[in-house]
Amino acid sequence: MATRAEDQQLVERVADDLGVKDHAFMTSRDSVERVVPCFGWHPWFSHQLYDDTQPPNPEERSTKFKQNHYRTVLVPKPDDLDFLDALPDPRPLSEVLGHIMDCLKKYPLALVGEIGLDKSFRLPEAWAPDVAVARDPSLTPGGRDGRRLSPYRVSMEHQKIILKAQLHLAGQMGRAVSVHGVQAHGVVVEVLQESWKGYEKTLPERMSMKKVVILSMRKRAAAERRKRQEIKSQSHFPREYACIHIQVHRNR
């Protein structure tokens, strides 16, 4: 499951070697364990993206633009220039979405994830010389790697922009998502409700709840029968599934 810039290609490599290629793999007797890849941008790294759907900034690649971006998306607003300079140059959101879309096209069963919202996460401090030297080179770059935590968090408004964009892409591509939620469960539900607004199923007027329950049970039973028949007669699962996985974490 991808989370940031440094591990997107790692997930691709694993998917190339061990990824589930199509539905037939789900029921095959292949002795090799397989994985379903996920591509997305985790909320812990959402500050590294800027919303380029707004009018272009002539100073987009300048140091001033970088500092202004992080002062806008981080709370409290950081004034430590050394901390700001140590952060990576922000990436345009459209570029990241384009890469995720390319991966979803390349891997037809891939999910979008891990995406979400996190109110408790704090950015690590800038690398100290002694910590940088002691860093384990076998670990994927971009993580905390023993650094102390700073007081800065990614604003919830910015996290929501990044999450909504990835949910929209998942909807376009018809893919399931893996959603991370920490101390933001209500906000996660609100964002999901906004995403499916207009697609809700409405009940016919004057239909009693008893009739609704009976019809629902009958439809579910019929659907289960069709599913079992398809599995028996074919070597793959039904064509599409939609699911949302919300991870609930306690304070660390």
Image (cartoon, helix red, strand yellow):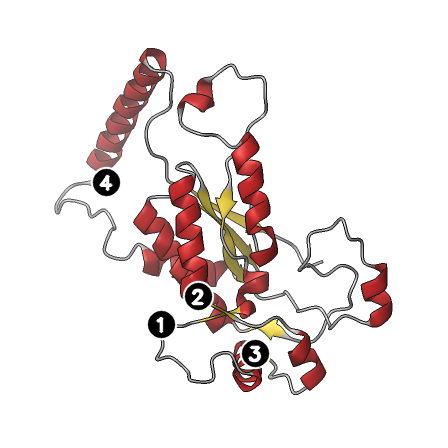
Q: Mark 1 is on which residue type?
A: Thr
**Disc 1 vs disc 3: Cβ atoms closer than 8 Å?**
no
Q: Position of residue 209 (x, y in %)?
A: 23, 40
Q: Is 84 or 156 nearer to us in this picture?
A: 84
Q: Residue 82 occupies which quadrant of the picture?
A: bottom right
Mark 3 Cα within 10 Å, few/some/many (few <14, many 20+)? Answer: many
Residue drawn at point x = 56 percent, y = 48 percent: 9
Residue highlighted by disc 3: 70
**Disc 4 vs disc 3: Cβ atoms closer than 8 Å?**
no
Q: Secondary structure at mark 1?
A: loop
Residue drawn at point x = 51 percent, y = 32 percent: 19
What's the CA distance linking mark 4 and mark 2? 45 Å
Q: Mark 2 is on which residue type?
A: Leu
In the rendered view, would you say 104 is above or below 96?
above
Which image quadrant: the N terminus?
top right
Residue drawn at point x = 23 percent, y = 46 percent: 201
Q: Mark 3 is on which residue type?
A: Tyr
Say whether disc 1 or disc 4 marks the residue closer to the N-terminus: 1
Q: Residue 135 occupies which quadrant of the picture?
A: bottom right
Q: Which mark is residue 53?
A: 1
Residue highlighted by disc 4: 209
